[in-house]
Amino acid sequence: MDIITAVILGSLQGLTEFLPISSSGHLVIAQHLFGLGEVPLLFDVLLHVATLLVVVGAFWHRILEILGALLRLLGGSRAEADRALGRLALALLVGTAATALLGLLVKDLPFFGRPRFAAAMLLVTALLLVSTALAPTREGRGLHHIRLTDGLLVGLVQGLAVLPGISRSGSSISAALHLGISRRDAGEFSFLLSVPAILGALVLELADAGELAARVPLPSLLVGMAAALLSGYLALKTLLRVVRAGRLPLFAFYLVPAGLAGLILL
């Protein structure tokens, strides 16, 4: 893999992982259209590490806040702020379990790698994003008022994102908005919930691999990871601004033509 290819793949990973347009769907379609082979395992692992670093880097303060509250609760704290963060942590745990369960149930479906299926799921993602225009327009609940049912339902929806063409960020943020979580906090809740999901995907990749060695030069690995970090950070910040402005449906203007073109041409 040359450096230019690494930059392209890394940039695409960063953009499509965070923008609500489905990285897996684009990969399935691109592999069919351009005859691309499998991405080398080590390169793919490093791209996922870059994705994880972007999320942790963006929300490190909240992650530390939650961990600190859990430690204080274990020490006997009864402060309401700590209890609220404890409920948030429990909701994230419930959501992670729901994601894992549903993801395992659907990940081996026979039509998984079919490009026309991925194209159809892009249309489903578009529908989810457009539906947020009907979500409650009031301020909504913040992270300190997250319920266990929020974690369960958003986690189940996130589990569906294992299907190529279903955007993880788009589906989970849409679900959070419909549950009455505020625009300000729906995106953050979605990405906090993504941390264990990304870690789980990394563990599964490594467990399924016979070996991690890859015929990818070190400069290409580093440049690809850097491209994923930069593009991912910019995409994440852009998405959070779009969510707070209530403009998620705008992404449907890309997803609908892309999905229809895929159904017609593939």
Image (cartoon, helix red, strand yellow):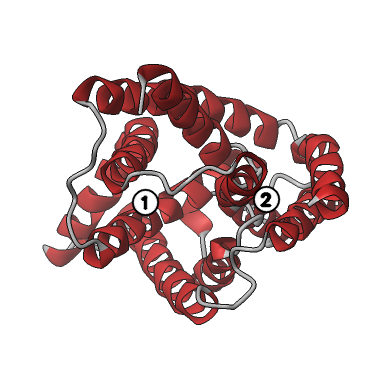
Task: Reply above or below: 84 against 51.
Answer: below
Residue 194 lies, in percent from the top left, at 43, 53
Q: Look at 63% across and 27% down and name the residue there.
A: 241
Q: Which corner quadrant of the image does residue 40 belong to?
A: top left
**Badge 1 amino acid:** Val
**Badge 2 amino acid:** Gly
Q: CA distance from mark 1 to mark 2?
A: 24 Å
Q: Which residue is mark 2?
A: 140
**Left/right of residue 157 with respect to residue 92 in the rendered view:** right
Q: Which corner quadrant of the image does residue 70 belong to?
A: bottom left
Q: Which residue is mark 1?
A: 195
Q: Secondary structure at mark 1?
A: helix
Q: Are marks 1 and 2 in contact (CB under 8 Å)?
A: no
Task: Reply above or below: 201 against 215.
Answer: below
Q: Look at 80% across and 54% down and name the residue there.
A: 123
**Left/right of residue 133 with respect to residue 189 in the rendered view:** right
For mark 1, does the 10 Å Cα neighbourhood hold few (<14), some (14 to 19), or many (20 or more) residues?
some
What mark, if any, has residue 63 been given in the picture?
A: none
Q: Which corner quadrant of the image does residue 16 belong to?
A: top right
Sequence-earlier tag: 1 or 2: 2
Nearer to us in this view, 266 or 50: 266
Farthest front residue in view: 35
Q: Is residue 136 visible?
A: no
Q: Look at 29% across and 39% down and name the residue there.
A: 46
Residue 17 lies, in percent from the top left, at 52, 41
Task: Reply above or below: 51 against 260.
Answer: above
